[in-house]
Image (spheres, rainbow, N blue to C red):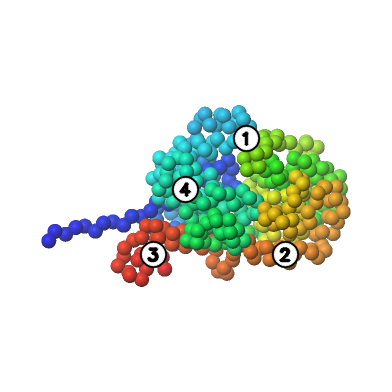
Amino acid sequence: MPTHAPIAPHRPRLGFLYNHDDIHQVAHTAPLISPLQRCLPTLGISVLTSSPEQARAVRSHLDPALAAPAFVSLKAGLGSRVLERAIGGVAPLRRLSVLRRNRELLSAFDALVVPETTSTLLKTRFGVRALKLIYVPHGAGDRSVGFRPEVRDVDLALLSGEKVRDRMVREGLVRPSGHAVIGYPKFDAFSGAPPQKIFPNDRPVVLYNPHADPLLSSWYRFGEQVLDYFANQDRYNLVFAPHVMLFRRRVHASLEHRHVRLRPPVPTRFLSIPHLLVDLGSERSIDMTYTRAADVYLGDVSSQIYEFMRRPRPAFFLNAHDADWRADPNYSHWRLGEVLDDPQRLGDVLPGAATRDDPFREAQEQAMRETFSVIPGQSAGERGAEAIARFLAREWPVETGDATHGGRPK
């Protein structure tokens, strides 16, 4: 009888896609790469970036003892880049162009790991329907943007904890077999370092961290008043480190809220005050330097509040858009500190905040347990790698003759 050579098993091609204007999403997925290489050493992994800065940031999270994965640079069309600059960045034309222009290259992958849901357009608009998307949200906040209907178009969601998982299940965004709780990979990357001393004195440090959203951010309405308050006192140091995208664009638009605003600049009088540090987008604004070092948090809707509360401390939230927030899950974090409708109240609430017992401490500790799943001795990157390995084995099973596992990870 003729003999036939065995059919080689299909080894899926996996890509880690980074397609944004900045590098703040990198730390949410890059810590999975090296653990995945150790978990599946024969898996072909590629890193796909849309800027040299992203590639450099990804490399900083890789284990130098392992062979580096392949790096691929994705380019946007010149027209989209020019038009996006011309309209002040009000629409993410460059990101859309990267997906559309590189859809043939991206379609050669079996699965992509992504930190955002814009990539679902590959499947829903650009015809790459066979592609599997593995989604790791870039943050663990409460805003509705983190629970968009596009999540239904991903094939596997890797989530930080039960809070996010339960809401996604409740809103029908994930399937029982289409998600796993892994913890927070960004903590793998940055939280081990001790807090840095930011100022050459021992005054309490307040971190003002407004978001970029044109409706929800406190910067547009209250920002100058906040900086004025801190400039004209000598009891506190202030780090002004907004969401990294706030000062990347002059015009901000929210399709979700149907809102467009011109972003005000930082008045120059605040740039040379010794007890004010203005950081409009350096790496220290995204690597948890300030959330670790600050004694008090002042913000609005940024998910960085949960990174700050890894060590519970006093927090205050500015309600600059008159939100009816108390029963709204999009503002759940506002129950973890005092909400201010007027920045003039800062003089009343800040004195002693960094040293007295915080009435919100117990609520913050509970929120952290619900937001971030922790398994002692196992990192989020390792848990994520195992979840991806199980997913790949389920989608592309390898016949090994082992009737118990069928080639899947044990």
Mark-to-mark CA distance, 1 and 4: 28 Å
Mark-to-mark CA distance, 2 and 4: 39 Å
Point out residue 410 in the picture as x, y percentages from the top left corner.
42, 68
Q: Is residue 137 left or right of residue 7?
A: right
The numbered mark at residue 90 is 1
Pointers 2 and 4 in contact (C-beta within 8 Å):
no
The numbered mark at residue 264 is none
Q: Residues within 10 Å of mark 4 (few under 14, many from 20)?
A: many
The numbered mark at residue 408 is 3
| SS assignment at label 3 | loop
Residue at 73% over, 67% down: 362
Pointers 1 and 4 in contact (C-beta within 8 Å):
no
Above or below for 267 versus 200: above
Mark-to-mark CA distance, 1 and 2: 37 Å
| SS assignment at label 4 | strand
Pointers 4 and 3 in contact (C-beta within 8 Å):
no
User: Sequence order check: which comes first, mark 3 or mark 1?
Assistant: 1
Mark-to-mark CA distance, 4 and 3: 24 Å
Residue at 37% over, 57% down: 396
The numbered mark at residue 363 is 2
User: Sequence order check: which comes first, mark 2 or mark 4?
Assistant: 4
Pointers 1 and 2 in contact (C-beta within 8 Å):
no
Residue at 63% over, 47% down: 283
